[in-house]
Image (cartoon, helix red, strand yellow):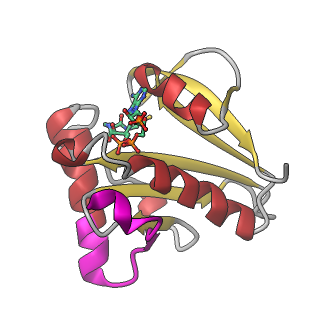
Amino acid sequence: MLRALGTDCHPAATARELAAHYAVRHRVFVDEQRIFHGTDRDARDDDQLTIHADRVIGGAVRLYPLDEDGEFWQGDRLAVLPEHRARGLGTPLVRYAVRTATERGGLLMVAHIQLRNVGYFQRLGWRRDGDVELYAGLPHQPMAIDLRT
Ligand SMILES: CC(C)(COP(=O)(O)OP(=O)(O)OC[C@H]1O[C@@H](n2cnc3c(N)ncnc32)[C@H](O)[C@@H]1OP(=O)(O)O)[C@@H](O)C(=O)NCCC(=O)NCCS
Protein backbone atom coordinates (compact mmCIF):
# COMPACT_ATOMS: atom_id res chain seq x y z
CA MET A 1 0.00 0.00 0.00
CA LEU A 2 1.54 3.27 -1.04
CA ARG A 3 -0.41 5.18 1.57
CA ALA A 4 1.15 2.98 4.25
CA LEU A 5 4.57 4.36 3.38
CA GLY A 6 3.74 7.42 5.46
CA THR A 7 6.09 10.38 5.30
CA ASP A 8 9.33 8.68 4.47
CA CYS A 9 10.70 11.50 2.34
CA HIS A 10 14.36 12.20 2.78
CA PRO A 11 17.15 14.23 1.21
CA ALA A 12 18.83 12.34 -1.60
CA ALA A 13 21.97 11.11 0.17
CA THR A 14 23.73 9.05 -2.48
CA ALA A 15 24.50 9.47 -6.16
CA ARG A 16 21.88 6.83 -6.88
CA GLU A 17 19.18 8.65 -4.93
CA LEU A 18 20.08 11.92 -6.57
CA ALA A 19 19.86 10.26 -9.97
CA ALA A 20 16.41 8.91 -9.04
CA HIS A 21 15.33 12.40 -7.98
CA TYR A 22 16.50 13.89 -11.28
CA ALA A 23 14.88 11.06 -13.24
CA VAL A 24 11.45 11.79 -11.72
CA ARG A 25 11.79 15.48 -12.50
CA HIS A 26 12.95 14.77 -16.03
CA ARG A 27 10.01 12.49 -16.76
CA VAL A 28 7.47 14.96 -15.42
CA PHE A 29 8.82 18.38 -16.41
CA VAL A 30 10.75 17.57 -19.61
CA ASP A 31 8.98 14.53 -21.10
CA GLU A 32 5.41 14.96 -19.86
CA GLN A 33 4.79 18.66 -19.35
CA ARG A 34 7.50 19.91 -21.75
CA ILE A 35 8.08 22.93 -19.56
CA PHE A 36 11.81 22.48 -19.95
CA HIS A 37 13.66 21.31 -23.04
CA GLY A 38 16.49 18.85 -22.64
CA THR A 39 16.85 19.24 -18.88
CA ASP A 40 15.12 20.94 -15.96
CA ARG A 41 18.32 21.15 -13.97
CA ASP A 42 19.71 24.60 -13.23
CA ALA A 43 22.30 26.36 -11.09
CA ARG A 44 20.18 25.76 -7.97
CA ASP A 45 20.93 22.07 -8.28
CA ASP A 46 24.64 22.74 -7.92
CA ASP A 47 24.19 24.87 -4.80
CA GLN A 48 25.18 22.94 -1.69
CA LEU A 49 22.34 24.56 0.26
CA THR A 50 19.74 23.04 -2.04
CA ILE A 51 17.93 20.00 -0.66
CA HIS A 52 16.85 17.39 -3.20
CA ALA A 53 14.10 15.40 -1.59
CA ASP A 54 13.44 11.90 -2.71
CA ARG A 55 10.64 9.45 -2.06
CA VAL A 56 10.98 5.73 -2.19
CA ILE A 57 8.48 5.51 -5.03
CA GLY A 58 8.45 8.02 -7.83
CA GLY A 59 8.32 11.44 -6.24
CA ALA A 60 10.63 14.43 -5.92
CA VAL A 61 10.76 17.98 -4.62
CA ARG A 62 13.52 20.55 -4.24
CA LEU A 63 13.94 23.36 -1.71
CA TYR A 64 16.50 26.03 -0.97
CA PRO A 65 16.98 29.19 1.07
CA LEU A 66 16.60 32.52 -0.70
CA ASP A 67 18.55 34.58 1.82
CA GLU A 68 21.76 34.19 3.77
CA ASP A 69 19.95 33.90 7.11
CA GLY A 70 17.82 31.02 5.89
CA GLU A 71 14.56 32.72 6.82
CA PHE A 72 13.00 32.65 3.36
CA TRP A 73 12.78 29.43 1.43
CA GLN A 74 11.55 28.40 -1.97
CA GLY A 75 10.21 25.02 -2.98
CA ASP A 76 9.93 23.80 -6.55
CA ARG A 77 10.15 20.78 -8.85
CA LEU A 78 7.40 18.96 -6.98
CA ALA A 79 6.70 15.90 -9.10
CA VAL A 80 5.04 12.52 -8.80
CA LEU A 81 5.27 10.07 -11.69
CA PRO A 82 1.94 9.82 -13.58
CA GLU A 83 1.41 6.17 -12.67
CA HIS A 84 1.66 6.98 -8.95
CA ARG A 85 -0.54 10.07 -8.77
CA ALA A 86 -3.57 10.57 -6.53
CA ARG A 87 -2.27 7.89 -4.16
CA GLY A 88 -1.00 10.17 -1.44
CA LEU A 89 2.61 10.68 -2.56
CA GLY A 90 2.60 14.38 -3.38
CA THR A 91 1.17 15.56 -0.08
CA PRO A 92 3.99 14.15 2.10
CA LEU A 93 6.51 15.67 -0.28
CA VAL A 94 4.96 19.12 0.18
CA ARG A 95 4.77 18.62 3.94
CA TYR A 96 8.35 17.39 4.01
CA ALA A 97 9.54 20.53 2.22
CA VAL A 98 7.63 22.77 4.64
CA ARG A 99 8.83 20.86 7.69
CA THR A 100 12.45 20.86 6.54
CA ALA A 101 12.47 24.60 5.87
CA THR A 102 10.89 25.18 9.29
CA GLU A 103 13.45 22.98 11.04
CA ARG A 104 16.22 24.96 9.39
CA GLY A 105 14.98 28.24 10.77
CA GLY A 106 12.71 29.34 7.94
CA LEU A 107 9.97 31.89 8.54
CA LEU A 108 8.28 31.85 5.15
CA MET A 109 8.25 29.50 2.19
CA VAL A 110 7.23 30.52 -1.31
CA ALA A 111 6.55 28.63 -4.51
CA HIS A 112 5.37 29.23 -8.06
CA ILE A 113 2.35 27.01 -8.50
CA GLN A 114 0.83 25.83 -11.77
CA LEU A 115 -2.70 27.17 -11.93
CA ARG A 116 -4.29 23.72 -11.88
CA ASN A 117 -2.59 23.01 -8.55
CA VAL A 118 -3.62 26.15 -6.65
CA GLY A 119 -6.50 24.40 -4.88
CA TYR A 120 -4.25 21.49 -3.98
CA PHE A 121 -1.80 23.83 -2.25
CA GLN A 122 -4.56 25.81 -0.57
CA ARG A 123 -5.79 22.60 1.01
CA LEU A 124 -2.26 22.12 2.36
CA GLY A 125 -2.29 25.52 4.05
CA TRP A 126 -0.71 27.69 1.37
CA ARG A 127 -2.15 31.05 0.31
CA ARG A 128 -1.98 33.13 -2.84
CA ASP A 129 0.88 35.63 -2.65
CA GLY A 130 0.56 38.10 -5.50
CA ASP A 131 -0.60 38.07 -9.08
CA VAL A 132 -0.21 35.29 -11.59
CA GLU A 133 3.12 35.57 -13.39
CA LEU A 134 5.15 33.74 -15.98
CA TYR A 135 7.55 31.19 -14.51
CA ALA A 136 9.47 28.82 -16.74
CA GLY A 137 7.39 30.26 -19.59
CA LEU A 138 3.99 29.28 -18.13
CA PRO A 139 1.46 31.15 -15.95
CA HIS A 140 2.08 30.34 -12.29
CA GLN A 141 0.43 31.56 -9.10
CA PRO A 142 2.91 32.78 -6.48
CA MET A 143 1.94 31.14 -3.19
CA ALA A 144 3.36 31.20 0.32
CA ILE A 145 3.06 29.50 3.66
CA ASP A 146 4.07 30.89 7.04
CA LEU A 147 6.41 28.47 8.76
CA ARG A 148 6.14 29.76 12.31
CA THR A 149 2.39 29.59 12.89
C1 LIG B 1 0.69 17.90 -8.19
C2 LIG B 1 1.18 16.50 -7.85
C3 LIG B 1 2.60 16.58 -7.31
C4 LIG B 1 0.25 15.90 -6.80
O1 LIG B 1 0.79 14.65 -6.41
P1 LIG B 1 -0.17 13.41 -6.06
O2 LIG B 1 0.69 12.36 -5.50
O3 LIG B 1 -0.99 13.07 -7.25
O4 LIG B 1 -1.10 14.08 -4.95
P2 LIG B 1 -1.73 13.35 -3.70
O5 LIG B 1 -2.15 11.96 -4.04
O6 LIG B 1 -0.86 13.51 -2.53
O7 LIG B 1 -3.01 14.27 -3.55
C5 LIG B 1 -3.77 14.27 -2.42
C6 LIG B 1 -5.11 14.79 -2.77
O8 LIG B 1 -5.09 15.94 -3.62
C7 LIG B 1 -5.78 15.68 -4.83
N1 LIG B 1 -5.08 16.36 -5.91
C8 LIG B 1 -3.95 15.96 -6.51
N2 LIG B 1 -3.58 16.85 -7.47
C9 LIG B 1 -4.53 17.83 -7.43
C10 LIG B 1 -4.72 19.01 -8.16
N3 LIG B 1 -3.90 19.37 -9.14
N4 LIG B 1 -5.77 19.81 -7.85
C11 LIG B 1 -6.61 19.46 -6.85
N5 LIG B 1 -6.49 18.34 -6.13
C12 LIG B 1 -5.46 17.53 -6.43
C13 LIG B 1 -5.79 14.19 -4.97
O9 LIG B 1 -6.89 13.76 -5.75
C14 LIG B 1 -5.92 13.76 -3.53
O10 LIG B 1 -7.22 13.94 -3.07
P3 LIG B 1 -7.84 12.95 -1.96
O11 LIG B 1 -6.89 12.98 -0.79
O12 LIG B 1 -9.16 13.55 -1.66
O13 LIG B 1 -7.88 11.62 -2.61
C15 LIG B 1 1.16 15.55 -9.10
O14 LIG B 1 -0.13 15.57 -9.66
C16 LIG B 1 2.18 15.92 -10.17
O15 LIG B 1 3.33 15.52 -10.12
N6 LIG B 1 1.73 16.67 -11.22
C17 LIG B 1 2.59 17.00 -12.32
C18 LIG B 1 3.69 17.95 -11.92
C19 LIG B 1 3.16 19.17 -11.23
O16 LIG B 1 2.12 19.72 -11.56
N7 LIG B 1 3.94 19.62 -10.22
C20 LIG B 1 3.57 20.75 -9.41
C21 LIG B 1 3.99 22.00 -10.07
S1 LIG B 1 3.31 23.43 -9.21
**Residue 80 relative to residue 96: left or right:** left
Tally the numbered discs.
0
Seen from the viewer's position, the closer of residues 4 and 19 is 4
Q: Residue furthest top?
A: 131
**Residue at image point 55% right, 60% down:** 96
Where is residue 133 drawn, in percent x and y? 55, 18
Q: Residue furthest bottom?
A: 14
Where is residue 124 drawn, in percent x and y? 60, 39
Above or below, 8 relative to 32:
below
Residue 10 on the magenta span: yes
Above or below, 91 relative to 57:
above
Seen from the viewer's position, the closer of residues 6 and 128 is 6
**Residue at image point 30% right, 64% down:** 21
- Locate the N terminus by quadrant: bottom left
Residue 65 on the magenta span: no
Q: Quarter of the image holding residue 46?
A: bottom left
**Residue 71 relative to residue 18: left or right:** right
**Residue at image point 47% right, 48% down:** 91
Above or below, 19 relative to 101:
below
Q: Residue furthest right?
A: 149
Seen from the viewer's position, the closer of residues 47 and 9 is 9
Magenta residues, as a range? 1-20
Seen from the viewer's position, the closer of residues 77 and 124 is 124
**Residue 41 relative to residue 106: left or right:** left
Find ligand 1 in the image and state its quadrant: top left
Q: Quarter of the image holding residue 67?
A: bottom right
Where is residue 61 drawn, in percent x and y? 43, 55
**Residue at image point 22% right, 50% down:** 26
